[in-house]
Image (tube, rainbow, N blue to C red):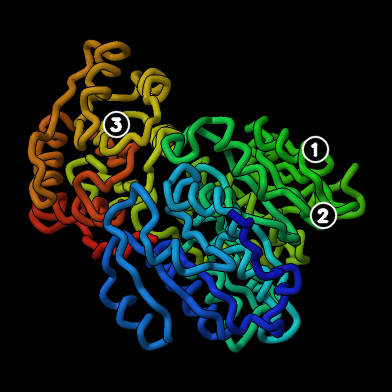
Amino acid sequence: MTPREFRDLSTLTSWHADWRGLKVAVLGLGVTGFAAADTLAELGAEVLVISASHDEMHERLLAVIGATFTLAVDQQSPPEALISFGADLVIVSPGFAPHHPFVQWVEDTGIPLWGDVELAWRLRDKVGTPAEWILVTGTNGKTTTVQLAATMIAAAGIRVAPCGNIGTPVLDAIRDPQGFDVLVVELSSYQLHYLGEIEPYSSVCLNIADDHLDWHGSEGEYIRAKAKVYANTKVACVYNRADPVTEQMVRDADVTEGARAIGFGLDVPGPSDLGLVNGILIDRAFLDERASHALEITTLDQLVSLGLGAGHIVANILAASALARSIGVEPEVIRDSLVTFQLDAHRIQPVANEAGIVWVDDSKATNPHAADASLKSFDSVVWIVGGLLKGVDLDDLVRAHVGRLRAAVIIGADRTALRAIFARHAPTLTVREVEENETSDVMASAVRLAAEHARAGDVVLLAPAAASMDQFRNYAERGAMFAAAVREFLGGEADGESASDDR
């Protein structure tokens, strides 16, 4: 069989290149997949979208933009429509793991495979001078750090957009007709796996802990994907001084000559770092006299008064400040921008305080690392925990926090493993289980059980350390159902919030 010849893609590095007639298959019809199909159709490419599920709105829109859709319920082998399409290029949505049969077929066939971020990088000149890109990743804290950095940069009068895994696809951001000076791009490990060659202005990996091992296949592959965030960085590679893995990533990165390593942490900073001294957040990185001087950003007391005093939030603020400082935002602008900043819902969010018991929604704590940060914020906790563990072990998490637990309430599918972990590390702890499987009943039962054991001075904390899709649509619905159940249990005292779509 004669090897197939593919169209030369080396010239397709601009919106203004000739994309007409290029045959592109897009794997996935979620937010990312539709953005890719819409962009390519606008460029004049011939687009085939393959998805395992119907999204009726997106499917109707595909017909409007002139793209073709094929439903592929069988995920074990590529559909005939994909095989016969003769694609010059395949764009893969982040949900498709590298071992997925469709991805394996593409790679075995030799068809070029890009992620949506690589496509956006090539097309970033649509509305004029391309924006600088600041990349943010990490096991936890990505969205908060992106929002913080974008808020700080916007306060300096710079046109900036948060995008990527945060909700707005980067392909939508580069096509916005108003244009931007800076894009702060949140990248998941999935997106980084398929990243391709880009040149960020500055970049950060906030932290590393086991997560998504089922997708990546191993801890090593997960770390290798995250480390791609630093490749070709031009100005500042920001890393977490408390996480040696992130520092090693920077040491190993192939960066643009002149790029600097900038550390952040909750300890005293060195001459190229941001950190804390006597309750003051300071910058010793972005000033000429950094060997002997420092710049004050804000104080811990001020952050506590703003509801931003939890340790992991302070770390996120330091990381975001480093990114903003790298692009020239002054410390006083950063300080002032924090006054109006609010954390997103379901991120260590108090929902009620009744009879000395505080009820806290941290449904966004979908892995052990995030739950660890949440638990550290409180002294005495009734912990609502469980869901889909994604192949991650909770032994270390439970062992580390036994001393602060009054009781635990288990929800979710992977409860057998949790039972065994509590039996090993907390054999005398009261552990209750929610037996209901219906979404409407799970949180009502969890709240009732938690209330039976909570005492004045305790925090009832929803920090599941697990994904939500076994019993809920997403972490937002899980958190909203928790708040609603607390409100009903306390007779309407808690504030509820509607769940938003999980991106």
Residue where numbered disc 1 is placed:
270
Residue at (64% x, 57% y) in the render: 135
Front-lying residue, 321 or 40:
40
Q: Residue at x 36, y 29 (%)?
A: 379
Q: Position of residue 9 (x, y in %)?
A: 70, 69
SS for dot 2: loop
Q: In the rendered view, does 491 fall on the left or right side of 281?
A: left
Q: Is residue 302 visible?
A: no
Residue 106 has which mark? Answer: none
Image position of 265 with respect to 38: above or below: above
Q: Mark 2: which amino acid?
A: Phe
* Mark 1 residue type: Gly
Q: 43 or 215, which lies in front? A: 43
Q: Is residue 330 left or right of residue 479?
A: right
**Which part of the image, by quadrant, shows the N terminus?**
bottom right
Residue under circle 3? Answer: 381
**What's the CA distance linking mark 2 and mark 3?**
40 Å
Q: Which residue is mark 2?
A: 286
- Lower position in the chain sequence, tag 3 or tag 1: 1
